[in-house]
Amino acid sequence: MIYRPRRLRGNRIVRNLVAEASVDPSRLIMPHFVMEGENRREEISSMPGIDRVTIDNLLIDVESDMKLGIESVILFGIPSDKDPVGTGAYACDGIVQCAVRALKERFGCDLLVITDVCLCEYTDHGHCGVVKNGNVLNDPTLELLAKTAVSHAEAGADMVAPSDMMDGRVAAIREALDDASFTDVPIMAYSAKYCSAFYGPFRDAAGSAPQFGDRKTYQMDPRNGKEAEREIMGDIDEGADIIMVKPALSYMDIIYRASEISNVPLCVYNVSGEYSMVKAAAAVGYVDEGRIVNEILTSFFRAGADMVITYHAREAIRNNWI
């Protein structure tokens, strides 16, 4: 035999030298659920190890994570009050806006603050847009999303991430940011976001489950792959600086497709259901959590991801799983 692949598997050092993909902690983004009030922390039963926190505790958690090497966060707001048009999403004193100001005041340029731009956490019906006669309206929603993105930028957000899946929202947000002199604020677009059962624990955490119907009319059909390519290229044409595939674990083919067709960086979201399944299996001893987290995160980068949003970021680094 001329070619013996095992020659390059003989020891740890050579395996590391020839590894095609690896997990860099600086490319992991930690999500946070921020709620109103003071000195409060609420466990999320469906997501062990993840809490809803008030801003004072958010600062404590982020400072601890930064010592581990986590330099990027994405914020999801949990308002005290909701209404049909999600007013809290774009209020200057909204929970996310206040959290951004606090984080930037404390950590400045040492922390990258990304904000989720959507209405679902702020509407009393739980949908991602304006609702009329039971229908989620696309174009009237764009103005509110744009207002939300601008309000986040005004608060000091380094990057905005629209997750609503309304058609044309990247262009609307880009125009609004530019008009407000935030031309340097990049957009991370949830470009290929599927209507997935993997979001269950997140909806529990954020209280964002739809009060009627579902999101199949605006989030993508899991059966479609070519459509993801159209969504991705459409967002790039509208000005997206980073694209995203969500969920990640069951959509490796979409991650690979995205990396092949896109000329902008690619983020993937290791979503709540994926996190919670690993936690549940590890709790009863079915899997080695550290090894399986390493394998999952590595697979995202192998498939073509440039960065990963993951609830496992903190534990993975702290426990030397990556």
Image (cartoon, rainbow, N blue to C red):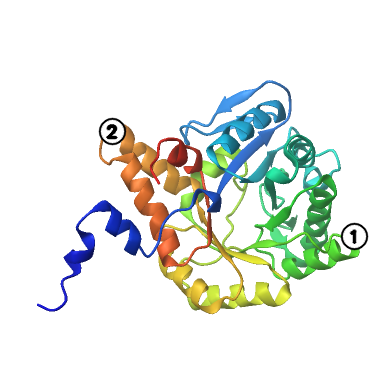
- Residue 130: horizontal and vertical position, in percent? 76, 56
Compared to residue 96, the image places residue 225 above or below, namely below
- Residue 287: horizontal and vertical position, in percent? 27, 41
Q: In the drawing, does residue 38 fall left or right of residue 283?
A: right
Front residue of 123 and 26:
26
Q: Is residue 217 visible?
A: no
Seen at 69% across and 40% down, the residue is: 77
- What's under tag 1, amino acid-wise? Ala
- What's under tag 2, amino acid-wise? Val
The N terminus is located in which quarter?
bottom left
Compared to residue 124, the image places residue 23 above or below, namely below
Seen at 15% across and 71% down, the residue is: 4
**Viewer-nearest of discs 2 and 1:** 1
Residue 180 numbered tag: 1
Seen at 69% across and 44% down, the residue is: 110
Mark 2 lies on a secondary structure that is loop
Residue situated furthest top in the rendering: 39
Residue 284 numbered tag: 2
Q: Residues within 10 Å of mark 2 (few under 14, many from 20)?
A: few
- Residue 268: horizontal and vertical position, in percent? 52, 59
Q: Is residue 195 visible?
A: yes
